[in-house]
Image (tube, rainbow, N blue to C red):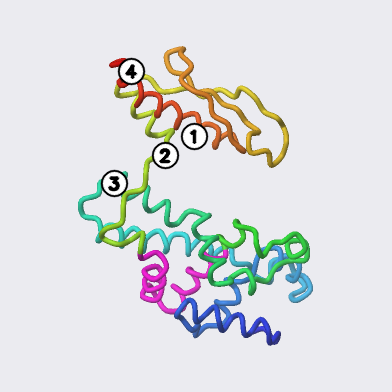
Amino acid sequence: MSEDPERAVRIDRLEQALDHRFRDRALLEKALRHSSYANEHSLGQTGEEGGLESNERLEFLGDAILALVVAEALYEAKPDWREGDLTRSLHAIVEGRSLATLAQSIDLGGVLQLGRTEESSGGREKPSILANAMEALIGAIYLDAGPEPVERFVGRHFGEALAVDAVQVERDPKTKLQETLMAAEGEFPNYRLVRDSEVEGDDARFTVEVRSKGERLADGVGRTKRAAERAAARIALERRRLEPAEQEV
């Protein structure tokens, strides 16, 4: 383990948050080692490229283990939910933003080993790095002690979403609009980019319109094309819900 006393304290706190003490300390260190660090230090330590392994393989394993544990918990807790309901809840729990938030809550970023470039560019706070490291850590826990500590960790941190009385996750508006139009008109909606301000970080950079049978249903704006498409679909759905009331008037 690292001789840095501050990092040692942080790792101790991390294991307390995980409710798991690693028997194989090398597994823990590997889970905390970003590829940028491994790439910078491999040649110096081994004399040949690839001598120091990053957390990427553990990330792959942890992703699969987490999905399995959460899927089983949802399956047991929600016997009346259909496949689509279970799938949406699963994705909401294990998606990157959720894992990054969890990683922040246990100060995972504070113990990561990063290369100089990632360190200087704020890598300890980057959601993608935190989410991937969270998956790697789950993979390391599984290899160190099997599924039980992973199940305890998942139950403790995602218990509300896995509870018997947890509500269903809403369908993506694009999916809902697609299903609505197919049932009513037998046709998929089409999305077309109307405007791109080309300003990075602009919350209204993209404007997208959604059409069906040649009719423009709605426009949506967003920071990304996907966000603009979702906004357009959401507005189109809202308008369709209002149509009967407007016709009665």
Residue placed under numbered mark 4 in the picture? 185
Residue placed under numbered mark 2 in the picture? 172
For this rendering, which residue is in front, 118 or 241?
Answer: 241
- Disc 2 vs disc 3: Cβ atoms closer than 8 Å? no
**Crowd tier of the residue under label 4, counting other residues whose Cα lies within 10 Å: few below 14, some 14–19, many 20 or above:** few
Instruction: Give the percent coordinates (x, y) of residue 117.
Output: 77, 61
- Disc 1 vs disc 4: Cβ atoms closer than 8 Å? no
Secondary element under disc 3, as helix, strand or loop, is helix
Q: Residue furthest left?
A: 80
Instruction: Give the percent coordinates (x, y) of residue 196.
Output: 67, 28
In the image, which residues are magenta? 133-159
Q: Residue at x 31, y 47 (%)?
A: 85
Residue 77 falls left or right of residue 90: left
Q: Residue at x 46, y 81 (%)?
A: 20
244 over 52 or under it: above or below: above
Q: CA distance from mark 2 to mark 3?
A: 15 Å
Q: Which mark is residue 230?
A: 1
Residue placed under numbered mark 3 in the picture? 83
Q: CA distance from mark 2 to mark 4?
A: 20 Å
The amino acid on which the numbered mark 1 sits, given as a three-letter code, is Arg
The amino acid on which the numbered mark 4 sits, given as a three-letter code, is Glu
Instruction: Give the percent coordinates (x, y) of residue 119.
Output: 74, 65
